[in-house]
Amino acid sequence: MLIDPLGQMSGETESLLLNASRAELVDKVIEPALRDGRLVVCDRFWDATVAYQGYGRGLPIEPLMSITMYAARGLCPDLTFLLDVPLAVSRERLRGRSADRLEGEGAAFFERVAQGYRRLAAAQPHRFMVLDGQRPEEELAVEVRTAVLSRWRG
């Protein structure tokens, strides 16, 4: 439902479905792993909901955050990487792939999403590492791995 390119739903429905999925992920995977003292790495967590549905779709941030934090059981990532990439570069990287419902949105939507991520990063600089996503993948991987391991060991 969430990625069907022909599917249509309100921003509210989209955010509730994403948060329902997040609640299951937290309950079944993340919290048990944390209780066991394991490192948890996610490709997107609740910052994505705030950026995409809040800033991108224009949903009010405060109620969205309340729902999102409820679904996440109050968990907040210790470290979030923001790979900052110009929209034109992002579009070029996606060329040739079939676009899902979100990837099919227009440039204005993605500019709002990017601005939302930048606002989140500016508001919580202790948690965010903003990286130039145009740098070589190998360099980024080393920087991310080093940052994760240094925090994990610390």
Image: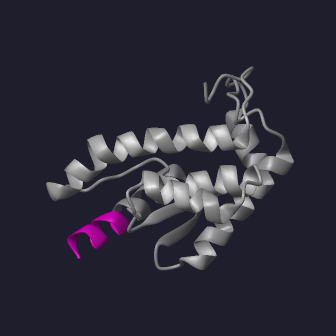
The answer to whether one can see residue 89 in this image is yes
Q: Which residues are magenta?
A: 146-154
In this picture the colour scheme is: one colour
The answer to whether one can see residue 83 in this image is no
Query: Against 109, is 93 above or below?
Result: above
> Which secondary structure type mostly characterizes the magenta part of the structure?
helix
Residue at x 67%, y 63% (from the top left corner) = 61
- Quadrant of the frame with the C terminus: bottom left
Q: Kindly give the residue lying farthest to the left in the view shown.
A: 36
Measuring from the top left, give residue 114's x and y in whole percent. 71, 58
Residue at x 47%, y 40% (from the top left corner) = 20
Q: Is residue 99 magenta?
A: no
Q: Is residue 117 left or right of residue 39?
A: right
Query: Against 65, is 32 above or below?
Result: above
Residue at x 44%, y 44% (from the top left corner) = 22
Measuring from the top left, give residue 93's x and y in whole percent. 68, 38
Measuring from the top left, give residue 87's x and y in whole percent. 77, 50
- Quadrant of the frame with the N terminus: top right
Measuring from the top left, give residue 139's x and y in whole percent. 47, 58
Quarter holding residue 29? top left
Residue at x 75%, y 40% (from the top left corner) = 91
Between residue 31 and residue 138, name the one nearer to us: 31
